[in-house]
Amino acid sequence: MKKIVIATKNKGKIREMKDAFADLPVELLSLADLGKDFPDAIEDGDTFEANSMKKACHYQKLTGLACLADDSGLEVEALNGAPGVYSARFSGDNATDESNNAKLQAELKKLGVTSSKADYQCALTMVDVDGCTLQTQGFCLGEIRTTAKGDNGFGYDPYFYLGEKSMAELTLAEKGAISHRGEALRTMAVLLKEYLK
């Protein structure tokens, strides 16, 4: 069975990826499963695709196994696309979900807006040991608001709305059906199935 390392330390992303590939003949391992403390990849690309490629290649070299990496984030229209590729570290190098959301709210407040069109974007890259590369993308259009709702999800989910529900009010299955990562994962599952034949 093909072993693929999920190149992230984010437990929410690991759960979503394992769920998406449950029917494929692959054994998905997290970085923690390998029992080593790997150095983080340097994400200095200016697109989500570039950063997911950097992460996949970085961990593929370190682990000697096929690696699957994603780079995803939030783009807010009122903020000219920010935080974009800086979504995870919007509030600085030691950013947390709380500090990132606080900065997002502060930026919207400066503009005097309580909501803005926004999208989540995900780029997913799988790099195999022979250098073979598969890449997919996913998008989820919605709205950022200044009111948080829901306890599910992570990141900006409590402030990202699809109609009257925030992303953090959805179940894992509901989120997977409409989210940016869900779309990228479904496309990747199709490519992987073909690749593994």
Image (spheres, helix red, strand yellow):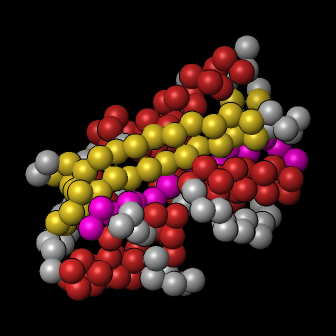
Residue 73: in magenta span: yes
Q: How many marks?
A: 0
Percent coordinates x, y for residue 26 in the rendering: 69, 30
Judged from this view, the residue extending furthest toward the left is: 164
Judged from this view, the residue extending furthest toward the front is: 80
Q: Could you say which quadrant of the image residue 76 lies in? A: bottom left
Horizontal side of 117 relative to 22 (left or right) equals left
Horizontal side of 162 relative to 65 (left or right) equals left
Horizontal side of 19 relative to 113 (left or right) equals right
Residue drawn at point x = 36 percent, y = 67 percent: 80
Q: Give the range drawn in magenta.
A: 64-78
Percent coordinates x, y for residue 144 in the rendering: 24, 62
Residue drawn at point x = 40 percent, y = 43 percent: 139
Asked if one can make out residue 15 in the rendered structure from this viewpoint, the answer is: no
Horizontal side of 133 relative to 178 (left or right) equals right
Percent coordinates x, y for residue 29 in the rendering: 69, 46
Q: Could you say which quadrant of the image residue 188 lies in? A: top right
For the stretch drawn in magenta, the main secondary structure is strand
Residue drawn at point x = 23 percent, y = 85 percent: 110
**Of residues 27 and 193, the one drawn nearer to the viewer in this rendering:** 193
Q: In which quarter of the image is the C terminus?
A: top right
Residue 160: in magenta span: no
Percent coordinates x, y for residue 101 in the rendering: 33, 75
Asked if one can make out residue 66 in the rendered structure from this viewpoint, the answer is: yes
Residue drawn at point x = 57 percent, y = 27 percent: 189
Q: In which quarter of the image is the N terminus?
A: top right
**Up/down of 123 relative to 41, above or below:** above
